[in-house]
Image (cartoon, grey):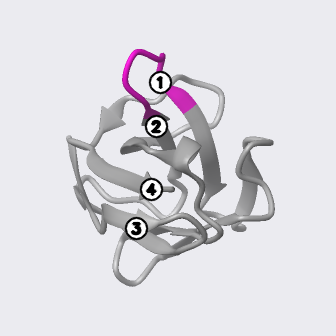
Amino acid sequence: QVQLVESGGGLVQAGGSLRLSCAASGRTSSSYVTGWFRQAPGKEREFVAEIIWSGGVTSYADSVKGRFTISRDNTKNTMYLQMDGLKPEDTAVYYCALKFTRTVPYRYWGQGTQVTVSS
């Protein structure tokens, strides 16, 4: 079993920055695949970014490419999402997720953290 706890959300003006954190506990591994998703009001949850812990390979949604950076700290079992150049359309609840194999759906989810970007 894995527990994920997000932190770092908040209110920021357009053009500003926030850094989200996601701490994993429980069953640990050096080969996680972890990702960030978001859900805006009235919209479906969407993929934001993903990182493969072994090797650090990353992928991003086109909407955040060049503005957001996903990273991880193996020693702290924590994943981060650095969000720069925030736009009002980035407003959403952000969720971190984890799986142990790249080819399966995400199994473990955090509780979510609100990010609000004012114009």
Number of the front mark, 2 or 4: 4
x and y percent of residue 90 in the render?
A: 54, 47
Q: Amino acid at mark 3?
A: Val
The residue that mark 1 highlights is 45
Give the spatial CA distance, label 3 vs label 4.
5 Å
Question: Going from the N terminus, do you reach mark 2 or mark 4 first?
Answer: 2
Please say if 101 is above or below 30.
above
Badges 1 and 2: C-beta atoms under 8 Å apart?
A: yes
The residue that mark 3 highlights is 12
Badges 1 and 4: C-beta atoms under 8 Å apart?
A: no
The residue that mark 2 highlights is 38
Residue name at image x 26 percent, y 52 percent:
27
Residue name at image x 48 percent, y 16 percent:
44
Please say if 112 is above or below 55.
above
Residue range in magenta is 39-46
Magenta span has 55?
Answer: no
Badges 3 and 4: C-beta atoms under 8 Å apart?
A: yes
Q: Nearer the viewer, residue 25 or 47?
A: 47
Q: Which mark is residue 117?
A: 4
Question: Going from the N terminus, do you reach mark 1 or mark 2 first?
Answer: 2
Q: Nearer the viewer, residue 54 or 36?
A: 36
